[in-house]
Image (cartoon, grey):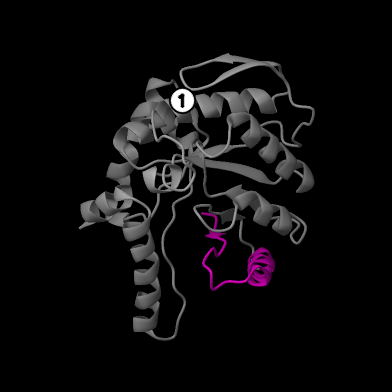
Amino acid sequence: MRLSYVSPFSRSVHRRNAVHYAELAEAAGYDSVWAPEAFGSDAFTLLGLLAGKTNRMKLATGIVNVYSRSPALLAQSFATLDEISGGRAIIGLGTSGPIVVKNWHSQAFDKPMTRTREAVEIIQLALSGERVDYEGACFRLEGFRMLIRPIQDRIPIYLATLKSRAVRQTGEIADGWLPTHVSVRNIEASRAPLVAGANEAGRDPLEIDMAALTLVACCDDGETARALCREHLAYYIGGMGTFYHELMHGYG
């Protein structure tokens, strides 16, 4: 098992603290840091900052959505991050939800699974250095070729998915899965569609990495720790759309 952490993204956490936490985490042996993105700081600027302040830890988006940036721009951003970090980038993608996509980015929240699959295909093709000629339901690219190459031969792509069909597609096309706010009691049932998707695609499900997000609050006082967790959960349940509300309700 490897330990990773999500970089703080609330208004109360200064960027200096984000750097300090990254330095502490790397010294403690953490494997990676994941930068979220909703309607606060953007992920790539923060990861670029942390790339210059760390030496070993992997740098991941956790996650950026497939609506607010084109697949071409995502490929450019990940290639740049991989280059400046010495080959430490991890691609974390998701759809987010209508609250962020429609109300913040003014984009229609349509065809989420198709858009995700096409974004993954285009990003992989662009990062390979090949000319991109792509005709899909959501994207059309013609004669596109990036002028830079990432250091890694293949930057791993992780998908944050919640619903069964989307988790199944993750098993078909992704290198890793990002289940969020995991319930230990339900993890095997939640993972079943991933296994089914991998088997259908002729892949070994055990080769698909899982980076599960769970809450940890380190305090001397239990009630203070629970209050911190409640604040975080309230943000997701109340401010990030119905998907997380349904997820927590399903956990009981």
- Residue at left offset 44%, top offset 68%: 216
Count up the numbered dots: 1
Q: Is residue 154 above or below residue 234?
A: above
Residue 128 location (% of width, % of height): 69, 24
- Residue at left offset 57%, top offset 71%: 13
Residue 41 location (% of width, % of height): 58, 57
Q: Is residue 193 above or below residue 243?
A: above
- Residue 143, image quadrant: top right
Q: Residues within 10 Å of mark 1 (few under 14, many from 20)?
A: some
Q: Which residues are magenta?
A: 1-27
Q: Is residue 188 above or below residue 153?
A: below
Foreground pick, 222 / 52: 52
- Residue at left offset 73%, top offset 21%: 145
Residue 204 location (% of width, % of height): 46, 29
Describe residue 88's horizontal placement relative to residue 5 as left or right: right
Name the residue type under label 1.
Answer: Arg
Query: In this figure, which residue is indicated by the disc labeled 1?
Result: 203
Describe residue 36's horizontal placement relative to residue 19 as left or right: left
Query: Which quadrant would the C terminus be assigned to in this image?
Result: bottom left
- Residue at left offset 53%, top offset 50%: 62
- Residue 109, image quadrant: top left
Judge whether residue 140 is colored magenta.
Answer: no
Assign a secondary structure to mark 1.
loop
Judge whether residue 18 is colored magenta.
Answer: yes
- The furthest residue to the bottom: 221
Foreground pick, 185 / 219: 219
